[in-house]
Amino acid sequence: AQSVSQHNHHVILSEAASLELGCNYSYGGTVNLFWYVQYPGQHLQLLLKYFSGDPLVKGIKGFEAEFIKSKFSFNLRKPSVQWSDTAEYFCAVKRYGGSQGNLIFGKGTKLSVKP
Amino acid sequence: EAQVTQNPRYLITVTGKKLTVTCSQNMNHEYMSWYRQDPGLGLRQIYYSMNVEVTDKGDVPEGYKVSRKEKRNFPLILESPSPNQTSLYFCASSSAPSGANVLTFGAGSRLTVL
């Protein structure tokens, strides 16, 4: 069955540390890829997305992600995290051309940034 | 302001007492969906709708019903709630059912079933 794996359940970093959150998916066809962020007590918001073209995509707040097709991965990165980045991050994968019924979320990675 | 509105935001109820969580969007989106969020399990899709009168099951539909009589509304109905339906529920919408469209989420409804 199609699945999305996020490798880390909880990541704790100090401010200014670099961040990389892993995301792997199991579907072999063409996919659209998303990272959503959920700040404490809030709803999910789009961080960035990949549809096609340059596999390195830039999102809001200095986040970026790289799509590596051969590794079925879409890892999220940020060179220097801030306390305000404390949130839960969800990777999501959608089969190209399918309905949004096929959008599958990972279980999420909670990021805690120490000031 | 473009948004997805859910009500109630918080609800405590008892086993077996029917309840409805409403969801409304003002963006003329065709696609709407319900998710539940549980610790360690991420978001799991309950039901989705690709247009008026078109609904389909997601990954965890048991114990839930939905309807889509109007484009803007997509209520989630729990006919006989049970404690395992205690969760945080999110409604989301998107502009079209096909293609790579971004979801707009509501603020969430925290439901506790005693």
Image: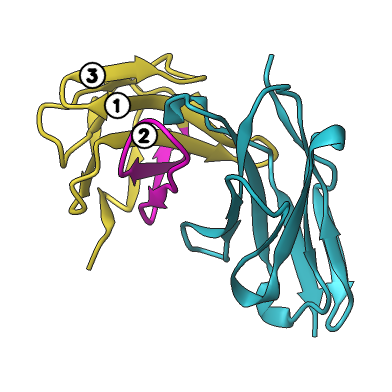
Of mark 1 and mark 2, the one earlier in the sequence is: 2
Of mark 3 and mark 2, the one earlier in the sequence is: 2
Pointer 3 indicates a residue of which chain? B
- The segment highlighted magenta reads B86-113
Q: Nearer the viewer, mark 3 or mark 2?
A: 3
- The kind of residue on which mark 1 rests is Ser
Shade representing chain B = yellow
The residue indicated by pointer 3 is: B54
Q: What residue is at 38 percent from the left and 52 percent from the top?
A: B104
Q: Quadrant of the N terminus of chain B?
A: bottom left
Q: What residue is at 42 percent from the left and 22 percent from the top?
A: B82
Q: Is residue B48 magenta?
A: no
Residue B50 locus on image (x, y percent)? 29, 27
Q: Is residue B67 left or right of residue B109?
A: left
Taking depth in this image into account, of B112 and B106 the one nearest to the observer is B106
Shade representing chain A = cyan
Q: Residues within 10 Å of mark 1 (few under 14, many from 20)?
A: many
Q: Is residue B32 left or right of residue B53?
A: right
Cβ atoms at labels 1 and 2 below 8 Å apart: yes
- Secondary element at tag 2: strand
- Secondary element at tag 1: strand
Please determine whether, in this image, residue B83 is positioned above or below residue A43.
above
The residue indicated by pointer 2 is: B33
